Amino acid sequence: MPSLRPLAWAVKQVATLQHIAGGRLQLGVALGGGGDAEYLAAGFRRSDRARRTDEFLALLPGLLAGQPLPQGSGASGGDAIRLLPAVPVPPLWVGGTSLAALRRAVRFGDGWLSGLQTPREFAASRQRLFELSDQAGRPRPLTGIGLHAAIGTGSGRHLAEVAAGMMHSMYGVPADRAREVTIAGTPAQVASQLAPYAQAGADLIVVVCDPAPTPKSWELLADARLLLTR
């Protein structure tokens, strides 16, 4: 969420992560949630988040390459300031499902990352993304989706309620909608629920384990991944 940070500082954080990761960072950027109070506490307005996110994405490649900060970027000293050392620009995954988010992904992204959609919704958004890419004469981005999953060896129904409850409490997703997009069950059940997203064309599936990831949940998720790729 670069819109919650001074933009040059956000770029510097990305540069630090890219340096530590040895150039292997993949960066996801979206408007994010949060209410007005959160933005005011950070010194910004929530109503500016789309504009500031676009500004961040436009500035990012040049600043990571060590080019000077442009005038009006909010830093004193203007074009005399550079963020060093220069690092490679990471692959950019632009998130969101609105039309504006899809346009942002076409303009700036190497990939587009959906979130909390059904397979049918994901496929429809993906098709619209490609239409926008073709209209703009831009390469079609890679596509992916982020989902919440509760994975274990017990009752899939119980696990689904756990994951849906987490989405409701964390993001305010209505309970019925949370259940609709929840992934839950044993590794085999999770793989079968993820398969429609792969069939719909997802190049990347990001899974957040609920209620809290543990070494055991990672092992079970790895089992589900193996089943999904067979």
Image: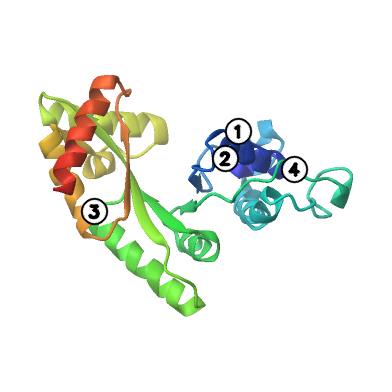
Using residue 20 as the reference point, say whether residue 10 is left or right of it. Answer: right
Residue 61 location, x and y as percent?
64, 55
- In front: mark 1 or mark 4? 4
**Which of the marked residues, 1 or 2, is nearer the chain's N terminus?**
2
Residue 36 visible, this angle:
no
In this rendering, the answer to whether 137 lies above or below 7 is below
Residue 158 location, x and y as percent?
15, 26
- In front: mark 2 or mark 3? 2
Q: To which quarter of the image does residue 82 belong?
A: top right
Scheme of colours in the image: rainbow
Q: Hey, what amino acid is under mark 1?
A: Glu
Report how far apart the C-alphas of labels 1 and 3 lie in the structure.
33 Å
Residue 175 visible, this angle:
yes
**167 and 205: which is toward the camera:** 205
Report how far apart the C-alphas of labels 2 and 3 lie in the structure.
29 Å
Using residue 43 as the reference point, say whether residue 221 is left or right of it. Answer: left
Q: Which residue is mark 4?
A: 83
Q: Which residue is mark 3?
A: 197
Element at label 3: helix
Q: Which residue is mark 2?
A: 18
The local crowd at label 1, few if under 14, some if 14 to 19, many if 20 or more residues have their Cα within 10 Å, is some
Q: Hey, what amino acid is under mark 3?
A: Tyr
**42 and 79: which is toward the camera:** 79
Report how far apart the C-alphas of labels 4 and 2 lie in the structure.
13 Å
Report how far apart the C-alphas of labels 1 and 4 lie in the structure.
27 Å
Residue 187 location, x and y as percent?
14, 34
Q: Hey, what amino acid is under mark 4?
A: Leu
Q: Which residue is mark 1?
A: 38
Report how far apart the C-alphas of labels 1 and 2 lie in the structure.
27 Å
In this rendering, the answer to whether 48 lies above or below 207 is below
Identified at 63% across, 40% down, the residue is: 15
